[in-house]
Amino acid sequence: QVQLVESGGGLVQAGGSLRLSCAASGRTFSSYAMGWFRQAPGKEREFVAAISRSGISPSYADSVKGRFTISRDSVKNTVLLQMNSLKPEDTAVYYCAASGTAYYSGSRYQNYDYWGQGTQVTVSS
């Protein structure tokens, strides 16, 4: 089992940047494929980015491609989401997720077994 704790959210103006961090504890971090999802008020949870156990071949939602970067640090047991050129439509609660059953778990939230509590990102226009 793994515990996930997100941090780094906040309020930023459009065009600004934030870096979200997800700290993992428990079972060996390298055993998990990781992902970021977000949920805006009144909307369904949506995929943002995913990364494999080894940290290669990241994938992104079309809405964030070219602006967001997912990475993982196996020494610090963290997964990062660097968010640049933020837009008001990026406003949401951002969740970190882990999957222990696959090398890479992709964009389906049903593929993930563990979730953090979420961190709020608000982008003002």
Image (tube, rainbow, N blue to C red):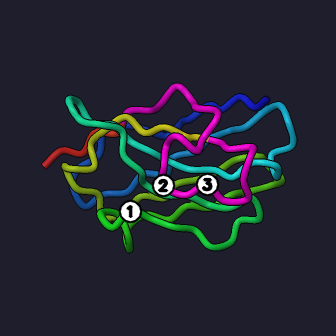
Query: Disc 1 on helix, strand or loop?
Result: loop
- Residue under the image location 30 percent in, 57 percent down: 16
Badges 3 and 1: C-beta atoms under 8 Å apart? no
x and y percentages locating residue 83 in the rendered image:
41, 58
From mark 3 to mark 2, how far is it between C-alphas? 7 Å
Query: Magenta stretch containing residue 71, yes or no?
Result: no
Front residue of 123/79: it is 79
- Residue under the image location 55 percent in, 61 percent down: 70
Report the span colored magenta: 98-120
Task: Identify the residue under disc 3.
Answer: 105
Front residue of 73/116: it is 116
Toward which corner of the image does residue 28 lie, by quadrant? top right
Amino acid type, residue under disc 3 in the picture: Ser
x and y percentages locating residue 78 in the rendered image:
70, 47
Q: Considering only vertical position in the picture, is 72 above or below 108? A: below
From mark 3 to mark 1, how far is it between C-alphas? 14 Å
From mark 1 to mark 2, how far is it between C-alphas? 8 Å
x and y percentages locating residue 7 in the rendered image:
54, 36
Toward which corner of the image does residue 6 lie, by quadrant? top right
